[in-house]
Amino acid sequence: MDDKIRFDIEFPIQASPQLLYQYISTPSGLSEWFSDNVNSRGELFTFIWDDSEEQAKLLSKKSGERVKFRWLTDEEEGASYYFEIRIQVDEITKDVSLMITDFAEEDEIDEAKMLWENQISDLKQVLGSA
């Protein structure tokens, strides 16, 4: 199995960090833009799309700032990959950005970035900042 490569993307977003955090950290918020439905039991989140579902473990979160998940398939394989959604506020301009850290195989990085761009585009529409 090829090693996955870390990539980071930044998305400027017109929304308050407090509101954004609700959309990245709660099952109801995530189901508005990330997947069709999200259920959680403690730190185990189940993401549901059409006819598939994936489970992820919440590795860490910092209120108002970031959430970090690991797909259970990666965990079962002993991989240390994760995806993190972080809210960044520019101290001077107060501009808000979402910073995404994720991992993909080398030949899938462009596809993974496009997927995130589509997801964040959905989030911006939900927020009314598109």
Image: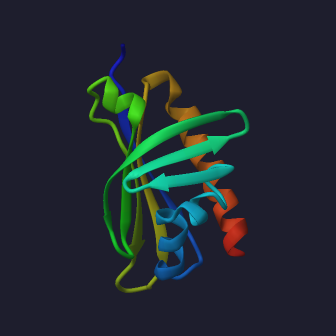
Q: How is the image coloured?
A: rainbow
Across and down, in percent, residue 89 comes to 40, 77
Residue at the image point whose x is 65% and y is 58% from the top:
33
Residue at the image point whose x is 36% and y is 30% from the top:
74
Q: Compared to 67, does 53 lie above or below?
A: above
Across and down, in percent, residue 86 comes to 40, 63
Count of labels shown? 0
Across and down, in percent, residue 16 comes to 52, 82
Q: Compared to 75, does 35 lie above or below?
A: below
The reply, left or right, for residue 58 in relation to residue 51 is left
The reply, left or right, for residue 83 in relation to residue 46 is left
Residue at the image point whose x is 35% and y is 42% from the top:
82
Q: Compared to 52, does 60 lie above or below?
A: below
Find the residue positioned furthest to the front. 41
Q: Quadrant of the N terminus?
A: top left
Residue at the image point whose x is 47% and y is 49% from the top:
45
Residue closest to the eye, 26 or 82: 26
The reply, left or right, for residue 13 in relation to residue 101 is right
Residue closest to the eye, 27 or 98: 27
Q: Quadrant of the C terminus?
A: bottom right
Across and down, in percent, residue 8 comes to 40, 48
Find the residue positioned furthest to the top. 1
